[in-house]
C-alpha cells in the first residue's frame, strides 16, 4: 500500500491549501488563464456560477494532464494520479482534502451533479501518459483522447446545463484532443514521447522508436496528414453547439483553424506560426460564440 506521505512527497508544494472559497476560485481561474488560456477565454462568457464550475473542472484537468511533466519518473506520475483518484473518491464520500482545486471541484460536483465515473475515466486515460510507447492504432488513440478531452467536454456540457448530449460532447472533445496532440507533438518528441499511432507511422515508413530518436529531423507529414484529415472530417460532422454550451465549446473552433494552417504548411508540425497569435484565437472563439458552430 502507498502511504499518504509518499503522495505528499511528489505533490506540488505551491498548490494552496484551504482558504476562502473566493480564494479557491481565484486560484483555479489563475491556473486556467496561465496554462489553458483558450478554455479560459471561452469560459469567461458563462454566467458566474457556471464559470466557477468550468474553472474548477479545467484546473483539475491541468493537474492530471501535467502529471507526467511534473515528475522525473513515470511511477511518480502514477502516484500523482492515484492521489487524485483518492481525492475524488473522498469527495463522493463526503470528505474534502485541504487543497484549493479539490475544494472547488467538490463544489462543482455537488452544484452540477457531476457523475463520478467521468473523473475516473479521465484519470484512467491519463495513465497512458506514463507509458513509454505509442498507441497501437487509431482506435487506441481514440480511446485515449475520448477518455481525456472527450470526457472533459462532456462534464463541461453538464456544468452548462446540457444533458443527453454526452456522445456529441465526447466526439467534439476528442477532436480537440487529437488536434492538441498534433500541436504538442514537437514538445512530446523533446521528451521522446510519441502519440502518433503505430499503424499511421508504419504507413509513413517509420516506427515510433525511429521518430523518438530523430526528433524534428524526421518527416512526419504522411502520418500527421492522415490524422489531420480524420480529425477534419469529424469536425464537419460535429459543427453545431447549443447556445448554453458555447462557453464550454466555442474554443473547439480553434481546431479547424489549426488544421487549416497545418495543411497550408504541408502538415509539418514543426512549422512556425501554426498556433496563430492570441488575438486571432480570441477572434475565432468569439465567432464561434456568435455562430454556434465549430
Image (spheres, helix red, strand yellow):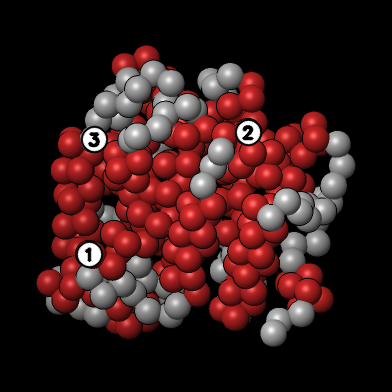
| Residue that mark 2 sits on | 111
| Residue that mark 3 sits on | 238
- The label on residue 138 is 1
Q: Earlier in the sequence, mark 1 or mark 3?
A: 1
Q: Judge whether 87 appears above or below 133 on screen.
A: above
Q: Position of residue 47 (x, y in %)?
A: 58, 19
Q: Is residue 218 visible?
A: no
Residue at 64 percent across and 57 percent down: it is 88
Residue at 35 percent across and 41 percent down: it is 166
Residue at 37 percent across and 62 percent down: it is 144
Q: Position of residue 27 (x, y in %)?
A: 74, 40
Label 2 Cα neighbours within 10 Å, binned few <14 / some 14-19 / many ≥20: few
Cα distance in 3D space between marks 3 and 2:
28 Å
In this image, 34 relative to 133: left or right? right
| Quarter of the rendering containing residue 93 | bottom right
In this image, 290 relative to 229: left or right? right
Q: Which of pointers 3 and 2 indicates the residue nearer the eye?
A: 2
Q: Secondary structure at mark 1?
A: helix
Furthest toward the top, the residue is 290
Amino acid at each position: 500500500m502507498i502511504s499518504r506521505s509518499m503522495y505528499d512527497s511528489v505533490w506540488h508544494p505551491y498548490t494552496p491549501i484551504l482558504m476562502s472559497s473566493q480564494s479557491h476560485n481565484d486560484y483555479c481561474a489563475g491556473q486556467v488563464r496561465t496554462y489553458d488560456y483558450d478554455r479560459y477565454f471561452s469560459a469567461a462568457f458563462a454566467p458566474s456560477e457556471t464559470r466557477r464550475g468550468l474553472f474548477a473542472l479545467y484546473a483539475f484537468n491541468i493537474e492530471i494532464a501535467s502529471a507526467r511533466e511534473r515528475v522525473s519518473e513515470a511511477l511518480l506520475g502514477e502516484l500523482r494520479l492515484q492521489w487524485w483518484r483518492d481525492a475524488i473518491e473522498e469527495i463522493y464520500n463526503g470528505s474534502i482534502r485541504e487543497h484549493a482545486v479539490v475544494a472547488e471541484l467538490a463544489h462543482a460536483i455537488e452544484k452540477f451533479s457531476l457523475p463520478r465515473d467521468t473523473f475516473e475515466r479521465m484519470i484512467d486515460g491519463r495513465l497512458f501518459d506514463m507509458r513509454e510507447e505509442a498507441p497501437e492504432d487509431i482506435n487506441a488513440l481514440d480511446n485515449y483522447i475520448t477518455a481525456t478531452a472527450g470526457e472533459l467536454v462532456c462534464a463541461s456540457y453538464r456544468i452548462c446545463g446540457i444533458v443527453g448530449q454526452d456522445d456529441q460532447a465526447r466526439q467534439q472533445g476528442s477532436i480537440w484532443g487529437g488536434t492538441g496532440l498534433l500541436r504538442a507533438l514537437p514538445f512530446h518528441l523533446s521528451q521522446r514521447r510519441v502519440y502518433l499511432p503505430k499503424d499511421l507511422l508504419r504507413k509513413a515508413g517509420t516506427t515510433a522508436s525511429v521518430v523518438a530518436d530523430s526528433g524534428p529531423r524526421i518527416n512526419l507529414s504522411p502520418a500527421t496528414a492522415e490524422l489531420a484529415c480524420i480529425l477534419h472530417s469529424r469536425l464537419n460532422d460535429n459543427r453545431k453547439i447549443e447556445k448554453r454550451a458555447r462557453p464550454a465549446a466555442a474554443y473547439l473552433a480553434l481546431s479547424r483553424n489549426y488544421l487549416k494552417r497545418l495543411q497550408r504548411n504541408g502538415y509539418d508540425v514543426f512549422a512556425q506560426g501554426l498556433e496563430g497569435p492570441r488575438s486571432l484565437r480570441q477572434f475565432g472563439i468569439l465567432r464561434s460564440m456568435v455562430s454556434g458552430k465549430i
